[in-house]
Amino acid sequence: MEQGQHVSFSYEGKELVGTVVTVKDDEATIKLDSGYNLIVSVSKVSDVQDVLVESEDVPVTEIKQKTTLPRVVILHTGGTIASKVDYSTGAVVAQFDPDELVRMFPELSELANIESRLVRNMSSDDMRFAHYNILARGVLEEVRKDVAGVIVTHGTDTLHYTAAALAFALEGLNVPVVLVGSQRSSDRGSSDASSNLLGAVRWITESKVPGVVVAMHEASSDGSIAIIDGLHARKQHSSRRDAFVSVNAPLLGRVSEDVEVLDTFRAAWLKEHAGKPQVLPFNEDLKVGWWKAHPQSFPEEFEVFASFDGLLLEGTGLGHVPITGIDEFTKEFHPKIREKIEALIKKIPVVMTTQTIFGRINMNVYSPGRKIMELGVLGQGMDMLPETAFVKLAWVLSTYPKEISSKYSENLRGEFSARSPLEDSHN
């Protein structure tokens, strides 16, 4: 067996066919034709036969567009949705140009006049504030050309950060902007790329609800695509096709046999706030820190943030961090954590979110929460995701550097929901 060889073989009583990815000593990794990787002991493999793969040169044809259909632009940034198997590593790599996506999914051209262009070809792990600005300006450029909407193909791992970033950076957005990814590469039979893309196009052309959303599988099957408001989307599973959920807000919509707008209140809000779009960019040099409360915390953990521009505290429960010395095991450390936070607040904004993901910050309920709020920690009453809170802090620092406290506490894009009378009665 050699790397790159396409073979049939017998292994543990089964007849299999695949491509050899790696061979090292007695171990080989084989990408089966089914799409799954199999690690085998070479000495136990028998009846190895070369399998010829017939190939033919297929001329690249022009994409036939129906100019009478709505115009939708795909901005391509990479990720699994635009990946094929790389047999030198057994992993997937982004290697489609934008037009190739449309050729792979010709159904798209039946729904809209599709255009596409490459913005970046990158893993979503490599996203930085500069990339948010590039994307926001790319979207604005297309919106000014009279489009029905824009699709951004994106790796799923940080897709929800980018959705929140675009929701803040694109003020007055008057068309749908849909972030789409996939959990399985586009050349696999189990890929969710086609369904997600088709759902995104249908949401744009049929709902016409402006604003930034995420379009991903609602369930593991291909039955429906969830449309999640970009400020409330979160990836909750590493590999399932229905990895994304809406947190602290109902689904904005659903695409199945029909296109349904489910959260009519949010849809009306987005339409009401549509106007003349503009980009309010991120300061690309900002350093925003993120500290997660945990048992056995030490005050030294905060020293790194002395040179930062802002800090997000991901607290426990309703918004707590260990600041109280209750016994001989805590008095040496926890009061010093409070001192570190207090010192930071004198220099930079510090905001609170909760690691429970669902639910609202209420630092009024317990004494430690009241003490941390008295220091000047922001975030009281908000139910933003940690990722949205992080992005909002960075954007407010960028856009309103002299009004950070008031602007961070303001519900600028519908990123947190209003408190109910029942919640207020529990303070």
Image (cartoon, helix red, strand yellow):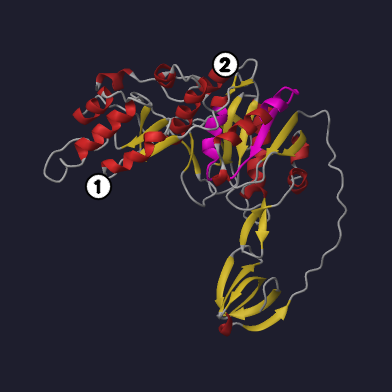
Residue located 27% across and 41% down the image: 299
Depth-wise, is mark 1 or mark 2 nearer the camera?
1
- Viewer-proximal residue among 14 and 322: 322
Per the image, label 1 sits on a secondary structure element best described as: loop
| Relative image position of residue 377 (x, y in whole percent) | 32, 26
The percent coordinates of residue 293 (x first, y second) are 31, 40
Q: How many marks?
A: 2
Q: Which residue is mark 1?
A: 296
Report the front residue among 174 and 320: 320
On the picture, is 65 further left or further right than 91? right
Q: Quadrant of residue 307?
A: top left
168 is within the stretch colored magenta: no
Q: Which residue is mark 2?
A: 273
Q: Secondary structure at mark 2?
A: loop
Give the quarter of the image for residue 272.
top right
- Identify which residue is drawn at 59% across, 44% down: 223
Q: Is residue 76 above or below residue 87?
A: above
Residue 222 in sight here: yes
Question: Pointer 1: residues within 10 angstroms few (<14), some, or many (20+)?
Answer: few
Q: Amino acid at mark 1?
A: Gln
Quadrant of the image for the N terminus? bottom right
Q: Is residue 350 above or below residue 5?
A: above
Residue range highlighted in magenta = 139-167
Place of residue 239 in the rendered image (x, y in percent of width and height, measured from the top left): 52, 52
Mark 2: which amino acid?
Answer: His
